[in-house]
Image: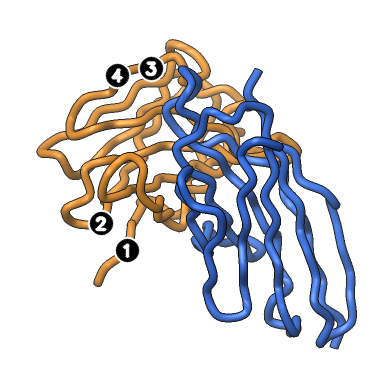
Amino acid sequence: GAGVSQSPSNKVTEKGKDVELRCDPISGHTALYWYRQSLGQGLEFLIYFQGNSAPDKSGLPSDRFSAERTGGSVSTLTIQRTQQEDSAVYLCASSQERVETQYFGPGTRLLVL
Amino acid sequence: KQEVTQIPAALSVPEGENLVLNCSFTDSAIYNLQWFRQDPGKGLTSLLLIQSSQREQTSGRLNASLDKSSGRSTLYIAASQPGDSATYLCAVLYSGGGADGLTFGKGTHLIIQP
């Protein structure tokens, strides 16, 4: 079956612009996660959705970051007023239930100039 | 702070050797531990998941063990092949009030020499 998909695969934007990243999880997976992978920083957890709800948003790096999930399926991660330090690969993962295997998408590579 | 550490950071071995990658974590209150591989410029591929109540999991030439009391996991790769070359990541889903997502180690960069 289809895996986790993300779009766009690459995004180049200018500092100060807003960007929206999309994640399509595996069908039927109730849990969805966003992570960020920066050069030299490793993989960093951002936010988790159970259904359409995110119990804790404290993992988001700043108030310029927001995320939502609709219909228990597609999720979008929005970064407002992008900064150069936002440049990273943003990865989405989903799992059938929270404590099950997480399957990752290919990521969106974001470059802020 | 709940952390995950992987040793070694890099490893290069000749083809055919058996090898062990190590992962340690700071808190025994976990739901599960997951091993991934990441190829350059690609996403993460799940290799094995060990639930908190389990001691080990096997898939083909891979075997992962979990010792919660000592905060350690190992990934054993048998009869290594050049196609095994990748970065291997260990990740823990903590249950003790930490992050809702996986906490990752920085990975072991593995090169299998033909």
Q: Quadrant of the N terminus of chain B?
A: top right
As rendered, which of A29 and B94 lies closer to the eye? B94
As measured in the structure, the alpha-carbon distance from the residue carrying label 3 to the one carrying label 2 is 22 Å
Q: Which residue is mark 2?
A: A26
As rendered, which of A22 and A52 lies closer to the eye? A52
As measured in the structure, the alpha-carbon distance from the residue carrying label 3 to the one carrying label 1 is 25 Å
Q: Earlier in the sequence, mark 3 or mark 1?
A: 1
Same chain for mark 3 and mark 1? The answer is: yes
The blue chain is B
Q: Which residue is mark 4?
A: A55
At 85% from the left edge and 52% from the top edge, which residue is drawn?
B8
Same chain for mark 3 and mark 2? The answer is: yes
**Residue A74 rendering spot, x and y as whole percentages:** 21, 43
The orange chain is A
Q: Nearer the viewer, mark 3 or mark 4?
A: 4
Q: Earlier in the sequence, mark 1 or mark 2?
A: 1
Query: How crowded is the residue under tag 4: few (<14 C-alpha within 10 Å), some, or many (20+)?
Result: few
Q: Which residue is mark 1?
A: A3
Describe residue A29's horizontal placement relative to residue B69 as left or right. left
At 42% from the left edge and 27% from the top edge, which residue is drawn?
B100
Q: Label 2 is placed on what type of residue?
A: Ile
Q: Is residue B114 above or below residue A110?
A: below
In the picture, the disc for residue A57 is 3
Question: Mark 3 belongs to which subunit?
Answer: A
**Residue A80 rendering spot, x and y as whole percentages:** 41, 20
Q: Are marks 1 and 2 in contact (CB under 8 Å)?
A: yes
